[in-house]
Image (cartoon, coloured by chain):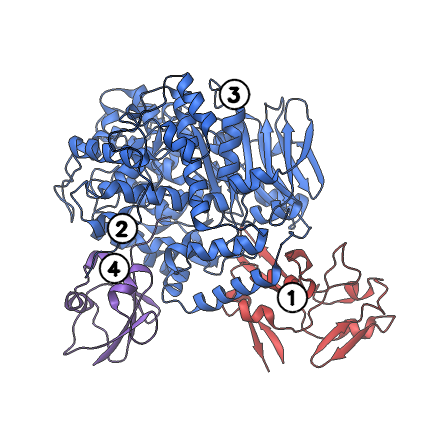
Chain colours: A blue, B purple, C red
């Protein structure tokens, strides 16, 4: 099948059986890979009462249709499972080199079932697939292990590892690859660890089948030449995502001291410019991407060994930096390395540690809880102590290992009010009190609070801040188009920053696969996946859906105390009206339940039957189901 | 003096490029800051994440020189 | 004419490997490229492109005379090569590559495509 590896692997970790089946063409066309394959498989196969860290959960690795092809940015690979943080569908993807390698080895999905009795790692060497004892790999840091496995297996292999945090079931554990690319969110590393899988090593030497290689080559070659001289190529190459730190501060959305405020007085000392001046070693690219936005750095702190780390990205600067009160780019880079090697998502870790710092400030967590250490804002040694306690689930680290919501439930004393999370997953790097569309985005995302699903900051700027009107249709459009890139599994930055249109990506898919595919079809696939993961969430967690689409109290009720966004907050009534508008525009009911009408449009009548059988199928709101769900932001006329 | 402003995405449309598809040529009086230039063009500051000139980042209080090309980076799409 | 490698500019994107295999073999398969990118991570954190310098040692060492100078490049004639591997061993820079599906070693023939796609100046064409 052109464009695809051709085989699905199913690994039973209990019996050691390895099953190979041909990738079904209707799965490929209907679900397009990665997020789509993951959503469909999880929905069809995981029992609704499965414990996310138990044997009935699945752990899935899947590249997408564009991965490994010469289409632009074909670097990514998705990992999926039921998340231990949200108890719902999860998919998290990473760049680097692994995705392409999996396609060249001939695979479109690897499904891990059950739990191994002993720690193991998987080796895929083209058609040879082996489960091997992990031995002394178990317990090693993620980065340390990748270095060791490159020595043991050879540089030809691409390696993905979990760290001690994933072995110990911390709900925001990640998977690391290529010395600094992560499948960071949703706790995918914890599920991999729950199955006792320490690492995955892949070598693929086969060629990817392509329907029309000359057309694909010409299309991508032309895009390469055109984007080389795009105005935004140079700043992106120089600073990467860290270029956003200044704007976020100057426009009041930078998480500062656990989202207490939104302007960090020391932001310049942890900015992208400071990164480029002080810690940068190499610009680092993902497979098939010529923007090379990755920044490989070295942190030099007196009294600590020099540490090499990919990053810090904007999100790490926001959450391990601003939200923890850090003032030194070396400290942020070191915090990044700690999280990477321990196997923790820097975003949830930074957010959770900032939350813990506020608890310490308020006397809710004490030195006694911290093995005699403090937990002061901006202190890298205090950060190091608590992040290690979290990875080991030792002392107060046990409560914090559940993330901010789980920790707040265990600590009580009103701490939930300042936990910045949705559905149990931490906010990424944007305070939302002046960016209401972004709050809606966080609170309606299927996987919890992640901006990847819908980065709506620009919508707030262009439609107008301090209003809920007009935001919902734009958030819905973004929730379809952005995760489409997680389905195709390629990077969205060329679309987002360099004027490569989604239609150009669709053309390359046509050349790759021969499919007579359109952008409309792809958007409907993405909307289909969105409704499927919503249904799955409801079937697992019950209803009403609205009770899960809730916003944290700080963002609704507490005005920003100072800085450029002083005084702003969302307000409960505004949020509820925005949510009402969102449900209507989705074709769902007042409680956020998909309707049969919209599920039929999307080709999911069985899902409608399933929801009906548990009393969670919605009836359309007055006005009916909109003909098109979601609306692209129209720029304001100047 | 003459300066050149370049950008991409939606911000490029606000610049009304006239040199190529990304670039607007501007003749300005005196020695204004980028902030003042944006004000004259009617472009809200919030539409610009930062400026990039001479291979490095510039704040909006930067004063371009004659003949200089300034890239305007819009707010990024996250990551 | 030759290809200059400036390794400090390499970011490891592998576009060169992709276009090389596409041009030579009409396939998407970086492992069939005549350029290797060797990452040195975690330290010192740099990429090392490895590309034929057209030094001619393989030409001298080939026992079958299957390597010929054509313009500025040394080129293996497939109909004369026995795949004995002497050139691979003899190469002083480890830039003669092999792949199980390809009947001869793979070496750069100076088609220049890699220099057209490289976006960082790591690979440029010089006289």
Marks 4/3: CA distance?
Answer: 48 Å
Marks 2/1: CA distance?
Answer: 41 Å
Label 1 environment density (alpha carbons within 10 Å; few <14, some 14–19, many ≥20) = some
Marks 4/1: CA distance?
Answer: 41 Å
Q: Which of the two residues, A42 or C78, is positioned nearer the viewer here?
A: A42
Question: Would residue A116 be found to the left or right of residue A362 on screen?
Answer: right
Query: Could you tell me which secondary element the residue under label 2 belongs to?
Result: helix
Residue C21: image location, x then y, percent: 65, 62
Tag in front: 3 or 1: 1
Question: Would residue A14 be found to the left or right of residue A337 on screen?
Answer: right
Label 2 environment density (alpha carbons within 10 Å; few <14, some 14–19, many ≥20) = some
Label 3 environment density (alpha carbons within 10 Å; few <14, some 14–19, many ≥20) = some
Q: Which of the two residues, A577 or A233, is positioned nearer the viewer here?
A: A577
Marks 3/2: CA distance?
Answer: 40 Å
Residue at mark 2 = A458
Q: Which of the two residues, A33 or A562, is positioned nearer the viewer here?
A: A33
The chain ID associated with circle 3 is A
Tag in front: 3 or 2: 2
Asked if disc 4 and disc 3 are in contact, CB closer than 8 Å, the reply is: no
The chain ID associated with circle 4 is B
Q: Which residue does the image show at 66% across and 45% down from the upper left?
A: A105
Tag in front: 4 or 2: 2
- Res B48 label: 4
Q: Earlier in the sequence, mark 3 or mark 2?
A: 3
Residue at mark 3 = A54
């Amino acid at each position: 099948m052109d464009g695809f590896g051709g085989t699905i692997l199913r690994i039973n970790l209990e019996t050691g059986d390895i099953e190979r089946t041909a990738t079904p063409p209707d799965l490929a066309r209907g679900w397009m890979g990665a997020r789509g394959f993951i959503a469909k498989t999880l929905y069809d196969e995981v029992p609704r009462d499965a414990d996310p860290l138990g044997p009935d959960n699945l752990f899935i690795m899947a590249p997408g249709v564009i991965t490994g092809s010469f289409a632009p940015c074909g670097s990514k690979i998705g990992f999926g499972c039921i998340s231990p943080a949200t108890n719902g569908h999860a998919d998290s993807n990473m760049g680097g080199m692994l995705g392409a390698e999996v396609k060249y080895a001939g695979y479109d999905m690897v499904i891990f079932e059950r739990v191994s009795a002993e720690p193991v790692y998987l080796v895929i060497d083209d058609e040879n697939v082996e489960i091997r004892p992990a031995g002394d790999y178990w317990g090693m840091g993620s980065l340390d292990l990748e270095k060791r496995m490159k020595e043991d297996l050879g540089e030809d292999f691409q390696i993905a590892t979990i760290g001690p945090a994933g072995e110990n079931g911390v709900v925001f554990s990640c998977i690391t690859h290529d010395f600094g690319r992560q499948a960071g969110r949703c706790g995918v590393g914890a599920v991999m660890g729950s199955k006792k899988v320490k690492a995955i090593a892949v070598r693929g030497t086969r060629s990817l089948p392509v329907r029309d290689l000359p057309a694909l080559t010409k299309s991508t070659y032309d895009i390469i030449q055109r984007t080389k001289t795009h105005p935004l190529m140079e700043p992106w190459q120089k600073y990467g995502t860290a270029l956003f730190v200044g704007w976020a501060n100057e426009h009041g959305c930078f998480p500062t001291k656990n989202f207490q405020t939104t302007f960090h007085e020391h932001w310049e000392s942890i900015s992208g410019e400071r990164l480029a001046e002080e810690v940068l070693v190499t610009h680092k690219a993902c497979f098939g991407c010529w923007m090379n936005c990755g920044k490989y750095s070295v942190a030099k702190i007196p009294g600590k060994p020099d540490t090499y780390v990919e990053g810090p990205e904007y999100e790490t600067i926001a959450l391990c930096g601003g939200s923890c009160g850090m003032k030194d780019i070396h400290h942020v880079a070191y915090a990044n390395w700690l999280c990477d090697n321990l196997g923790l998502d820097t975003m949830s870790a930074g957010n959770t540690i900032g939350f813990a710092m506020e608890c310490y400030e308020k006397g809710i967590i004490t030195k006694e809880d911290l093995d005699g250490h403090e937990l002061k804002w901006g202190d890298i040694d205090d950060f190091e102590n608590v992040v290690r306690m979290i990875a080991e689930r030792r002392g107060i680290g046990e409560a914090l290992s559940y993330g901010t919501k789980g920790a707040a439930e265990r600590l009580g004393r009103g701490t939930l009010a300042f936990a910045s999370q949705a559905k149990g997953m931490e906010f990424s790097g944007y305070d939302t009190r002046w960016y209401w569309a972004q709050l809606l985005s966080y609170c309606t995302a299927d996987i919890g609070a992640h901006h990847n699903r819908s980065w709506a900051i620009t919508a707030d700027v262009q439609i107008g801040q301090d209003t809920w009107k007009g935001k919902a249709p734009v958030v819905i459009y973004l929730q379809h188009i952005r995760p489409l890139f997680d389905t195709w599994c390629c990077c969205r930055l060329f679309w987002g920053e360099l004027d490569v249109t989604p239609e150009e990506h669709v053309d390359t898919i046509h050349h790759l696969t021969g499919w007579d595919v359109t952008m409309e079809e792809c958007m409907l696939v993405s909307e289909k996946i969105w409704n499927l993961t919503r249904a799955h969430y409801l079937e697992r967690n019950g209803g009403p859906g609205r009770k899960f689409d809730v916003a944290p109290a700080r963002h609704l009720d507490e005005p920003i105390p100072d800085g450029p966004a002083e005084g702003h907050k969302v307000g409960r009534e505004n949020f509820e009206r925005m949510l009402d508008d969102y449900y209507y525009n989705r074709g769902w009911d007042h409680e956020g339940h998909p309707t049969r009408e919209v599920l039929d449009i999307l080709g999911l009548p069985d899902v409608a039957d399933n929801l009906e059988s548990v009393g969670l199928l919605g009836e359309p709101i007055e006005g009916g189901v909109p003909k098109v769900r979601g609306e692209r932001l129209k720029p304001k006329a100047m | 003096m003459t300066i050149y402003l370049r950008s991409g995405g939606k911000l490029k449309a606000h610049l009304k490029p006239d040199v190529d598809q990304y670039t607007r040529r501007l003749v300005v009086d005196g020695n204004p800051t980028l902030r003042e230039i944006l004000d004259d063009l009617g472009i809200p500051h919030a539409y610009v994440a930062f400026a990039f000139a001479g291979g490095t980042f510039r704040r909006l209080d930067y004063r371009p020189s004659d003949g200089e090309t300034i890239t305007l980076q819009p707010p990024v799409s996250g990551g | 004419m030759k290809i200059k490698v400036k390794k400090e500019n390499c970011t490891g994107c592998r576009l060169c490997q992709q276009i090389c295999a596409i041009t030579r073999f009409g396939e998407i398969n970086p492992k069939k490229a005549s350029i290797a990118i060797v990452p040195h991570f975690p330290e010192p954190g740099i990429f090392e492109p490895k590309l034929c310098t057209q030094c001619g040692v393989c030409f001298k060492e080939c026992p079958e005379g299957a390597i010929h100078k054509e313009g500025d490049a040394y080129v293996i004639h497939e109909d004369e090569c026995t795949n004995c591997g002497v050139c691979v061993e003899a190469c002083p820079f480890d830039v003669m590559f092999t792949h199980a599906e390809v009947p001869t070693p793979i070496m750069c023939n100076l088609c220049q495509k890699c220099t057209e796609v490289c976006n960082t100046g790591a690979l440029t064409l010089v006289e």
